[in-house]
Image (spheres, rainbow, N blue to C red):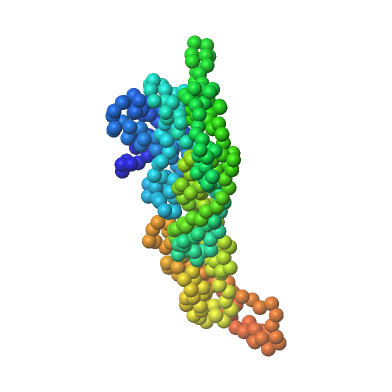
């Protein structure tokens, strides 16, 4: 792919709807189809690029990820934040899907050969629960997958050992069957061979001709710091294997956050609720609070009001794909004892006689104090 983005490749704006995307693809795909431009390698390359752009933008989920993270996210490999990019699908499959059955031969050449492309395996979807500490630092995870794998008996071909496929008797190897509809001849994918042009006469006794059996494997992924609940990682080519040697699907890993015992997450910031006694807020104090990196000390100014929010810069969650970090917000709560002894009660009654200990009628209103709550 060139540096040109997917929207530019199709010649559309970033707000284009699905109809505009499909219309742009149809026009460009017809102009650059290799069968219309025999021997033109540049046209073939453009056709692939157009197909790749359409494959991403026509899929709402993939388009949303591309819009959010660009090519760096969309084309990441090795278990990066997203790896559905690096297009390896068949552009002619996309062409036939958009134009309908029979259009593989619209220019009168090459259609039957392309219809025999192997089918891709299904994607897998799983959920990965992470602690805030893991999200803050980024983490490597090893995940066990239960999926369809290639059959060892037939090496994924679906054939009984020592046998081979035979020409489909229904379509005579064309992968399509034609029928008359009024003045037109319409072609459809052959139901007998699923468009492959060949069938398995003697299927493998283990996988019964599918080329796949149930199995398991492991993948390792790098979870980037700053990822959030509901976002996902896409690991390309680690999903179910396709039937009879078809390429593997992808693995979609949806992120979930474990509930933390100390913190609440709000975007890149985290909130900690700090409970202090009346003497601590009245006189001021220095206390130790938890952070995602361990313990840290913070000064409580004398006269701190309940509900005050103190800020510790850079102690929050890293912004995804950035060096910036959120803050830790410490909300102060003044703790009131539910039970006190006779001595404490006497001292409090004596303290209550002092004018400075009672609410000041000329003090700022509640709303004014709320405006100044965050330091």
Task: Determine if residue 127 is in view.
Answer: yes
Q: Residue at x 52, y 16 (%)?
A: 179
Residue at the farthest top position: 183
x, y percent for residue 16:
42, 35
Above or below for 175 versus 242: above
The quarter of the displayed image where residue 225 is located: bottom left
User: Who is closer to the viewer here, 187 or 323?
Assistant: 187
Left or right, 355 with respect to 35, comes to: right
Is 202 left, or right, of 235 in this rendering?
right
The residue at 54%/56% (across/down) is 144
Q: Residue at x 29, y 33 (%)?
A: 42
Q: Nearer the viewer, residue 57 or 339?
A: 57
Residue 236: give x, y in percent of width and height. 45, 48
Q: Which quarter shows the N terminus?
A: top left
Spot the residue most to the bottom: 343
Residue 73's place in the image compared with 10, above or below, is: below
Whole-percent x and y of residue 180? 52, 14
């Amino acid at each position: 792919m060139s540096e040109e983005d997917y929207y530019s490749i199709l010649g559309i704006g970033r707000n284009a709807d699905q109809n505009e995307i499909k219309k742009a693809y149809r026009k460009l795909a017809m102009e650059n189809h290799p069968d219309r431009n025999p021997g033109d390698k540049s046209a073939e390359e453009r056709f692939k690029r157009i197909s790749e752009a359409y494959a991403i933008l026509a899929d709402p989920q993939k388009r949303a990820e591309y819009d959010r993270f660009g090519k760096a996210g969309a084309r990441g490999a090795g278990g990066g934040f997203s790896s559905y990019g690096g297009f390896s699908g068949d552009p002619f499959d996309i062409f036939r899907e958009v134009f309908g059955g029979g259009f593989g031969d619209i220019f009168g050449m090459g259609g039957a050969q392309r219809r025999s492309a192997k089918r891709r395996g299904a994607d897998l979807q799983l959920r990965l629960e992470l602690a805030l500490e893991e999200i803050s630092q980024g983490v490597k995870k090893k995940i066990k997958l239960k999926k369809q794998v290639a059959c060892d008996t037939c090496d994924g071909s679906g054939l009984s050992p020592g046998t081979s496929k035979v020409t489909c008797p229904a379509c005579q190897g064309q992968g399509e069957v034609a029928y008359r509809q009024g003045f037109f001849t319409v072609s459809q994918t052959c139901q007998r061979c699923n468009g492959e042009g060949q069938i398995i006469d003697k299927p493998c006794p283990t996988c019964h001709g599918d080329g796949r059996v149930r199995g398991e494997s492991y993948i390792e992924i790098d979870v980037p710091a700053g990822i959030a609940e509901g976002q996902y990682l896409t690991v390309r080519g680690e999903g179910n294997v396709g039937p009879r040697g078809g390429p593997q699907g992808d693995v979609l890993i949806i992120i979930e956050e474990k509930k933390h015992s100390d913190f609440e997450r709000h975007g890149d910031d985290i909130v900690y609720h700090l409970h202090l006694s009346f003497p601590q807020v009245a006189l001021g104090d220095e206390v130790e609070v938890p952070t995602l990196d361990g313990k840290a000390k913070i000064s409580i100014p004398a006269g701190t009001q309940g509900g005050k929010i103190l800020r510790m810069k850079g102690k929050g969650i890293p912004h995804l794909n950035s060096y910036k970090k959120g803050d830790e917000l410490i909300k102060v709560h003044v703790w009131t004892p539910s039970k006190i002894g006779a001595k404490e009660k006497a001292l409090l009654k004596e303290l209550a006689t002092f004018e400075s200990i009672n609410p000041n009628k000329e003090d700022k209103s509640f709303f004014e104090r709320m405006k100044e709550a965050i330091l």
